[in-house]
Amino acid sequence: MTKLADYQPLIEQIRTAGAYDLVAIALVEPAENQYLLKWKYASGNLNDRFKKVILQTGKGIAGMVFKTGKPLLLEDTSDLADSANLFNYPILIFERLKSMGAVPLWHNGRVAGVLLAGYRGSSQMTEEKLHYLKQQASKGIGELNGKELMLH
């Protein structure tokens, strides 16, 4: 297994290779009777405010991807981030993201985190760029081996 410190150079490589403005990883922290997600690593971030936010399963971008185990593509976030919804999407607000994609990070058949990449300009995230994120996640990142549960 690789060390936790290996996450940072990996996400910096992903950000450079994909020409993203921001790449971040949220990891699961087991809590009593539920799972909490926290943004732990970021590259290209404007500040660290979003890292203080605790995300709950099913809420926000990371929470939805974690709960469903499916990628999420938002080509234009302006519709999503209206004033009534702002508190559900802190990373969009704090990092001024206008276009983003997020994929689950798998470890031994379970979702263990979320890999997010985004742009500060609208309509920059495409299916192809989301596919690149999926490829990176499936290779394994840091201690996460990228192995999904296979049902035959």
Image: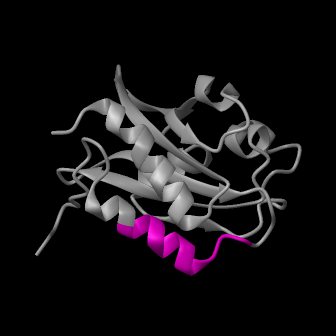
Q: Measured along the vertical axis of the image, is residue 150 above or below residue 146?
A: below
Compared with residue 110, is residue 3 higher up or lower down, i.e. above or below?
above
Taking the image as shown, residue 34 lies to the left or right of residue 47, namely left
Q: Position of residue 116 (x, y in %)?
A: 54, 53
Residue visible at 75% across and 36% down? 87
Q: Nearer the viewer, residue 85 or 94?
A: 94
**Which image quarter is the N terminus in?**
top left
As for residue 111 lying within the magenta part, the answer is no
In the rendered image, residue 104, in percent from the top left (x then y), is placed at 40, 55
Residue at 62% over, 45% down: 60
Q: Quadrant of residue 44?
A: top right
What secondary structure predominates along the stretch shown in magenta?
Answer: helix
- Quarter placement of the C terminus: bottom left
Residue at (83, 61) in percent of width and height? 79
Task: Report the front residue among 48 and 13.
Answer: 13
Question: What residue range appears in magenta?
Answer: 124-135
Residue at 47% across, 75% down = 131
Is residue 28 shown left or right of residue 25? left
Q: Nearer the viewer, residue 86 or 42?
A: 42
Residue 49: quarter of image: top right
